[in-house]
Image (cartoon, grey):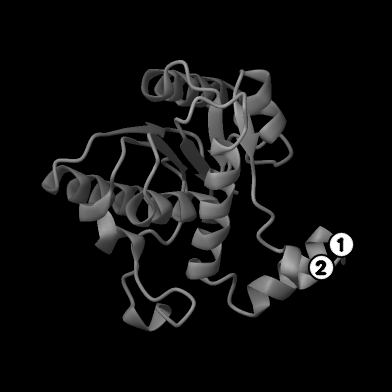
Amino acid sequence: MVRKFAHHGYAAITPHLYFREGSDSPDDIGARVRAAGGVADAQVMGDVAGAIDYLRAQPNASGKIGVIGFCSGGRHTYLAACTLSGFDAAVDCWGGNVIVDNPKDLNAKRPVAPIDLTEKLNCPLLGIFGNDDANPTAEQVNRTEAVLKRFNKTYEFYRYDGAGHAFLNTYRDAYRPEQALDGWKKVFAFLHRYLAASTASIAAE
């Protein structure tokens, strides 16, 4: 993903959220972290903030920063855009669990649902979703959009029929070429609009 953004002219970085967990295979580390409840939101936000600082220090970066994430990274993107300063654009690709309906799903690692922080969203937001996705569902996307409207936030949502979770991912059976092509066009048009001459972007996850 970082190479893709570099190909399009962005200085891109992705924090390695699992580096503290050792040097096992990525699959093993991921399974272990998920079994333990995932990475704490505060830790992820700290890593993203460090990535922002690193990008800003690069001589080829203009200072404008975008954040993008997929699946859990989409949730992290929403959370980052509501809790960290310095973003000029944010792209949430099918971020699951932005809305939390059962309070029991909140815990020390995930103490708040990102949707509840929407009032603090501090940059334009792009959302890319498949209408066949189970997390987030189309109904949850509708509810997220309603909250964004209520707080008069600048956002664009695009939803794709015949597409489910991870439909941009060429390595998965869920990949949908036609929808993915249009989705990427929407992503790069959005980033160009808000980052303009910027050469800085973050791939959150």
**Rendered view: 101 above or below 85:** below
Q: Are marks 2 and 1 in contact (CB under 8 Å)?
A: yes
**Rendered view: 25 above or below 52:** below
Any part of residue 134 in sight: no
Of 92 and 192, which appears nearest the observer?
Answer: 192
**Rendered view: 144 above or below 64:** below
Instruction: Look at the image and tell me in which quarter the N terminus lies.
Output: top right
The residue tagged 1 is 25
The three-letter code of the residue at mark 2 reads: Asp
Residue at point 30% right, 52% down? 139
Residue at point 70% right, 42% down? 172
Q: How far is disc 2 from disc 1 in space, using C-alphas?
A: 5 Å
Q: Position of residue 181 (x, y in %)?
A: 56, 21
The residue tagged 2 is 28
**Rendered view: 77 above or below 98:** above
Quick check: 172 left or right of 152?
A: right
Any part of residue 202 in sight: yes
Question: Where is residue 153, by image quadrant?
Answer: top left
Q: Position of residue 170 (x, y in %)?
A: 70, 33
- Which element is circle 1 on? loop
Question: Where is residue 124, by image quadrant?
Answer: top left
The three-letter code of the residue at mark 1 reads: Ser
Q: Position of residue 19 (x, y in %)?
A: 74, 63
- Which element is circle 2 on? helix
| Outermost right residue | 24
